[in-house]
Image (spheres, rainbow, N blue to C red):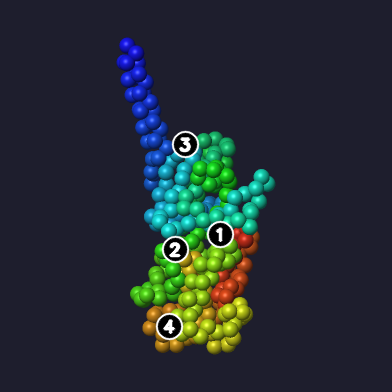
Amino acid sequence: MRKIIKTLVFVISITTFLTSCTNDDREITVETLDANKDAKRIADIVNSGTEGIPYLEGSKLFKKSEDNFEIHLPKDVFFLASELDSNGNVNHRRILEISDASVTCSCTKGSGCSPVKAQGEYYCVMNSGCTTCSMSTARVGTKKNIKILGIIDYNMGVSFVSETKSLLTSSKSKIISKSISEHFLNKPEVKQALLEFYSVIYDKKIPSFITENKNAPSGYSFSKVNLFGNEIMVPVQSNSFSRELGISDIDDAAVTCSCSSGSGCVKKSFMGAKYCDAGSCTKCTLND
């Protein structure tokens, strides 16, 4: 009899364990909003001021509970994030690289708050039974609340944005973010990669205005560059080299930043390049 009871306990334990694993690790497909068919829903999300989370191709979403999900990024792609203190403030001194994030979609009034993907970002949106929906982000495992400041894709490297295929170019579709945080630019590997890129396009004779981060003199224009998945504009001199690569260029004055929700999104310079610092803007775009 005792042997039978032990066997039953073992079977129940195994069944509970397997059921728990199945519930906790169920990969789901994120609903993707169509730019045409779901234009109103996308506009509502943007106008709400909700800040999305970059959700690039190859990411996976796992449902951990009814309102909690985990985003797992592809190999060698990381969120740049900072843990929040008890007052909800960002710790700018400690920037983390994390490959996954825990996201909770909470409906505080009614029920039904679910994840969607819109314009390359992840959001929590209200369903028919919910009138107030909120999203919170935490580190997987520690459950400490975080703010995602950007994304870095080490698979990308640095390249001009052009439809002409070459070792120095990549397609516009590869751009993940059109705004950048200073935390991203201050990473040593990012600085080094940009310097090496300048060394190639200027034949190892990098102009002093770049190393001193000054405005470009006359005779220079700006071209779009993919910097580890982030968009910046770098100073170039129009010549046969750029024409062969199909690289377009514009004047400094034509490079602008716009904020469609929130405040901030300021045009700044870094090592001669122009970029948009989002600040408190939830939808910051580099216009070129």
Q: Real-space Cα distance between discs 3 and 2?
A: 33 Å
Label 4 Cα crowd, 10 Å radius (few <14 / some 14-19 / many 20+): some
Label 3 Cα crowd, 10 Å radius (few <14 / some 14-19 / many 20+): few
Q: Real-space Cα distance between discs 4 and 2?
A: 25 Å
Quarter-wise, where is residue 4 in the image? top left
| Left or right, 287 with reference to 163 | right
Residue 60: image x %, image y %? 40, 49
Nearer to us in this view, 172 or 143? 143
| Helix, strand or loop under label 4 | helix
Give the residue type that dot 2 points to. Tyr
Q: Real-space Cα distance between discs 2 and 1?
A: 24 Å
| Helix, strand or loop under label 1 | loop
Label 2 Cα crowd, 10 Å radius (few <14 / some 14-19 / many 20+): some
Q: Which residue is mark 2?
A: 154
Q: Which residue is mark 1?
A: 283
Give the residue type that dot 4 points to. Ser
| Helix, strand or loop under label 3 | loop
Q: Which residue is mark 3?
A: 66
Nearer to us in this view, 75 or 61? 75
Residue 127: image x %, image y %? 49, 41
Q: Is residue 192 above or below residue 153?
A: below
Is any atom of residue 278 visible in this view? yes
**Which mark is on residue 242?**
4
Residue pictured at 35% horizontal, 28% vertical: 14
| Helix, strand or loop under label 2 | loop
